[in-house]
Amino acid sequence: MPFYLFEDPSSGDIKEIFFKMNDIKTYQKNGVEWNRVYTVPQASIDANIDPHSSQAFVEKTRRAGNIGDLVDMSKEMSERRGGIKNDPIKKDHIKQWKKDRNLTKPSYTP
């Protein structure tokens, strides 16, 4: 965010100042250097998604940036469900995949 907050040390007034990325973040007015005000970032990440809910996955990834983000989220949910060996959703998927293709043995082990 290119806007920074500065406080006048004498009056306590707060002013929002725009800076470019490479600018030095200091502000002076009438020879008085104002104090920079640091704030808590307002961004948040939803880390409480239910790994067993396909609807929650769809809602979370609805606005995913690209396919890589979607694959990363899918991998994270699989790890939360118990890893590759114990993931019930992945086991059900492989079981259905084998049934659809009349296979008795998968070409890879989950």
Image (tube, helix red, strand yellow):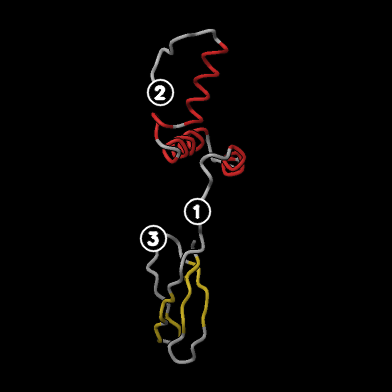
- What residue do we see at 55% from left, 13% from top? 99
Tell us which disc is closer to us: 3 or 2. 2
Q: Amino acid at mark 1?
A: Ile
Type of the residue with mark 2: Pro
Real-space Cα separation, disc 1 to disc 2, in angstroms: 30 Å
Counting from the top left corner in percent of width and height, residue 3 is at 50, 67
Q: Is residue 96 above or below residue 31?
A: above
Instruction: Determine which of the numbered discs, if any, sits on residue 45 in the image.
Output: 1
Question: Would you place residue 49 above or below residue 96 in this image?
Answer: below
**Is 64 placed left or right of 19 in the picture?**
right
Q: Secondary structure at mark 3?
A: loop
Q: Residue 71 location in percent, x, y?
A: 48, 33
- Residue visible at 57% across and 40% down in the picture: 53
In the picture of the structure, the residue carrying the numbered disc 2 is: 110
Dot in front, 1 or 2: 2
**Amino acid tagged 3:** Asn
Taking depth in this image into account, of 11 and 21 the one nearest to the observer is 11
Total labels: the figure holds: 3
In the picture of the structure, the residue carrying the numbered disc 3 is 22
Q: Residue furthest bottom?
A: 10
In what element is the residue under mark 2? loop
Q: Measuring from the top left, give residue 31's x and y in whole percent.
A: 40, 86
Q: Position of residue 45 (x, y in %)?
A: 50, 53
Disc 3 crowd, CA 10 A, few/some/many (<14, 14-19, 20+)? few
Query: First in sequence: mark 3 or mark 2?
Result: 3
- The reply to whether the C-beta atoms of the residues labelled 1 and 2 are less than 8 Å apart is no
Structural distance between the alpha carbons of marks 3 and 1: 28 Å
Q: Residue at x 43, y 41 (%)?
A: 80
